[in-house]
Amino acid sequence: MQVPEPSLQHKVMFEAVENHMPEVIIVDEIGTEAEALACRSIAERGVMLIGTAHGEWLENILKNPTLSDMIGGVETVTLGDEEARARRCQKSILERKAPPTFYFLIEMRERHYWVKHKTEKSVDMLLRGQNPLVEIRKRDDRFNVVIERWQTYDRREI
């Protein structure tokens, strides 16, 4: 469905689900809290979502209060002394609040270079200060897609 006015995108998303019962919805440029909440609500109804959002790296989405809900959101949790010692961390840590709306997240680094995350695992590892394992996809000189599975995430590497 076409969106006549960008500010109405979240309403058109709900209209599509309620009136047309789609299996998949593609959303271009998720950028408002209303759109992020609509995505979560629609995903919870079992509709597959494909969406774009602006952010150079996964960390940009994680730190964006409007968009972070789509990758589970972030909350500060205070651990007990024993738990903090067991985890070898501070008592106050950041954790993901909820399951992510999108199972996969793809960073489009360049036209022919993409980084594919399993959203839940990558977010959890980043919040723990670790580099997640990701899948790198790039095109070779013949434009074939080359897949390098489970590389350590390094946002500086291209």
Image (cartoon, grey):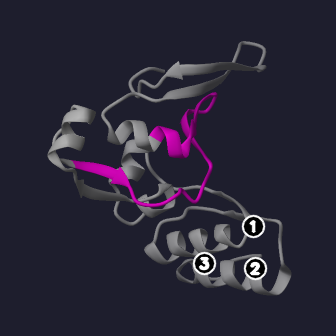
Residue 57 visible within the image: no
Q: Residues within 10 Å of mark 3 (few under 14, many from 20)?
A: many
Amino acid type of the residue tagged 1 in the rendering:
Val
Q: Position of residue 50 (x, y in %)?
A: 68, 57
Residue 8 visible within the image: yes
- The dot on residue 9 is 3
Classify mark 2: helix, strand or loop: helix
Residue 116 falls within the magenta-colored stretch: yes
Q: Position of residue 125 (x, y in %)?
A: 41, 36
Q: Position of residue 52 (x, y in %)?
A: 58, 55
Query: Magenta residues?
Result: 93-122
Q: Which residue is mark 2?
A: 17
Cβ atoms at labels 2 and 1 below 8 Å apart: yes
Name which quarter of the figure residue 48 lies in.
bottom right
Amino acid type of the residue tagged 3 in the rendering:
Gln
Classify mark 3: helix, strand or loop: helix
Residue 71 falls within the magenta-colored stretch: no
Q: CA distance from mark 1 to mark 3?
A: 17 Å
Q: Say which quadrant the N terminus sits in.
A: bottom right
Q: Name which of mark 1 and mark 3 comes first in the sequence.
A: 3
Looking at the rendered image, the disc whose residue lies closer to the viewer, 1 or 3, is 1
- Which of the pair 122/76 is nearer the observer? 76
Name which quarter of the figure residue 22 lies in.
bottom right
Q: Name which of mark 3 and mark 2 comes first in the sequence.
A: 3
Q: Which residue is mark 1?
A: 47
Say which residue appears at 64% left-offset and 28% top-offset: 112
Q: Residues within 10 Å of mark 1 (few under 14, many from 20)?
A: some
